[in-house]
Image (cartoon, rainbow, N blue to C red):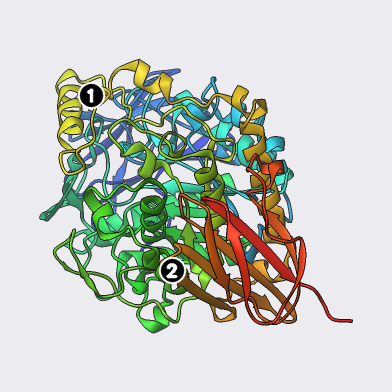
Amino acid sequence: MDANPATGECPGAVYLGDGRCRFLVWAPLAGQVNVRIVSPRERILNLKRQKRGYHRGVFEDIEPGSLYFYLLDKEKERPDPASRHQPEGVHGPSRVVDTGAYAWTDQCWPGPSRRDLALYELHVGTFTPEGTFDAVTAQLDELKALGINTLEIMPVAQFPGSRNWGYDGVYPYAVQHSYGGPEGLQRLVNACHGKGLAVILDVVYNHLGPEGNYLADFGPYFTNRYTGPWGAAVNFDGPGSDEVRRFFIQNALYWLTGFHLDGFRVDAVHAIKDFSARPFLEELNSAVHRRGERLGKRVYMLAESDLNDPRVILPPVMGGYGFDAQWTDDFHHALHTLLTGERDGYYHDFGGLRHLARAFGRGYVYTGQYSEYRQRRHGRSPRICPARQFVVFAQNHDQVGNRACGERLAALTSFDGLKLAACTVILSPFVPLIFMGEEYGETAPFQYFTSHPDPRLAAAVSKGRRQEFAAFGWEGAVPDPQDENTFLRSRLNYGLRSRHPNRVLYALYRQLLQLRRELPALADPDRENMEVLGLEPENVLFIRRWSGADQACLVLSFNRTGTAVTLPVPAGRWRKLLDTADERWLGKGSTTPTEFSSPGKMEVILEPETCVLFQKLKED
């Protein structure tokens, strides 16, 4: 970025203290921009046009809480594209916010180390009955006790209405009013840091929602040269794109500085069309990491990408975008098909044990092979990328919520299957992600919900949702996203956590996360210290991991019946640390020994859908 004096500042209304407020907006399509203060005292303020279509002004007697619109060429009255708060919704006035007024108590918070990351994804509106940031705060002790150390919060940018996943946001800088607004988010982040929990925010830079999206009235934020699932693409490489990039990069820096966030999950980076020599994503990552260094804390950039392209997570010096890690759908699909038998839609490319073995060994399953579902070759090998650059999961908001009826894994597999899924994810060398409620087997669905005030848009969304699932052949009526009951059905039921058998599953998740932290062989994220063997006829995955002298063997059986198998356990004395077939975990009982000597192989009978973990004993 160049040193243009206007563009070095964060856009929007920035309170400077002592009743002074600075307004900055990029509006090259307007010859004149005024600020119309509507509360507490109505008046019109004139902004001065500057280079590249920026309009700027500093004014007295404007306190936090003041409401305003921008007036474009004395005709169009619009909210601020960089509004900090929209208390009256996406069409209402913007509110001046003093983000620097909050009394933080998280000084010297460094954030978790990369090798220790354990993520928990949640949606603020359905995580608690209240659906607010403050209500999430009340659950932090439970989350800490579970053993995770990072919350990954679905988007909170202001969206239409009060119910939404967050991917229809239209004000990237404004915190959703119904969740508690900017002050509520600051309280939550501060409380998380006080408990030793980091906070990563899901941000959407590949599109904005349709309702309340007035950016096109200000400037060329969008381009018709590319189209995506949501219409015109964001203009990241055409005329005016420097300023569009600044708008979104400054947004990320605003979250880091004003809300002390620990990083971002960047939604659908594969939907960002950008053919410039230095891509927006590379520039974004560089700016975020520099700001983290300046703030003296670790920050993490996670990408959602379905490209299976290691450039997403390679450093810029190697031609990459510089993300710290990416969500890995291949791992999920390989695991999901083994547990459920589903093969429709994109699951068609998966279903064999070899796919999960390949995911463990490479991070991606498809690294250049032909994909029947895509009808072309897909992916590229990420062989030089370490395991800590892949985020894996058995469930997440997409894989649950993008089902026709939003069924969770608890509705699709057995209790043994749920235990096996937990072991596969958490005891892998990758960064584990738990979707809210998964840890105790939540049965409430997570369905797609909206609350668009525009009736025509609401009808279009409902129709489009029904048409989306033709390729999967899922039966049953698709819930209407606009129906409030669709939202209410998606709320968590915490009462399950203390019931039988849910409390046993919850205890297993805690045990697994503890083993991951404390066992050196499991804590080591280096895939070079791992051997993966798929025993195809037995449908058993055998994984040996080591760190220094510490060795562990993980056995994952996806068979639906008891299985006799010969395991290549290295010679030496071994102790069993976990067996999900044990009665403690509501299994039918296990015949695998607690301690044994292996001459180099071990013959065992594994119970259906079970996980066994062995640790090699140190020699005297």
Q: Secondary structure at mark 2?
A: helix
Q: Is residue 577 above or below residue 97?
A: below
* Structural crowding at the residue carrying mark 1, measured as other residues with C-alpha within 10 Å and reported as few (<14), some (14–19) or many (≥20): few
On the image, the x and y values in percent for residue 23 come to: 40, 41
Q: Secondary structure at mark 1?
A: loop
Which residue is painted at 21% across and 61% down in the image?
273
On the image, the x and y values in percent for residue 143 come to: 66, 40
Q: Amino acid at mark 2?
A: Ala
Q: Is residue 482 above or below residue 145?
A: above
As rendered, which of 569 and 243 lies closer to the eye? 569
Asked whether, in this view, residue 21 is left or right of residue 379, the answer is right
Q: Do callouts 2 and 1 mark residues in contact (Cβ within 8 Å)?
A: no
Is residue 31 in view?
no
Find disc 1 in the rendering and name its residue.
477
Q: Amino acid at mark 1?
A: Ala
- Mark-to-mark CA distance, 2 and 1: 36 Å
As rendered, which of 352 and 545 lies closer to the eye? 352
* Structural crowding at the residue carrying mark 2, measured as other residues with C-alpha within 10 Å and reported as few (<14), some (14–19) or many (≥20): many
Instruction: In the rendered structure, find residue 357 and report the number of the disc placed on it.
Output: 2
Quadrant position of residue 151: top right
Q: Quadrant of the C terminus?
A: bottom right
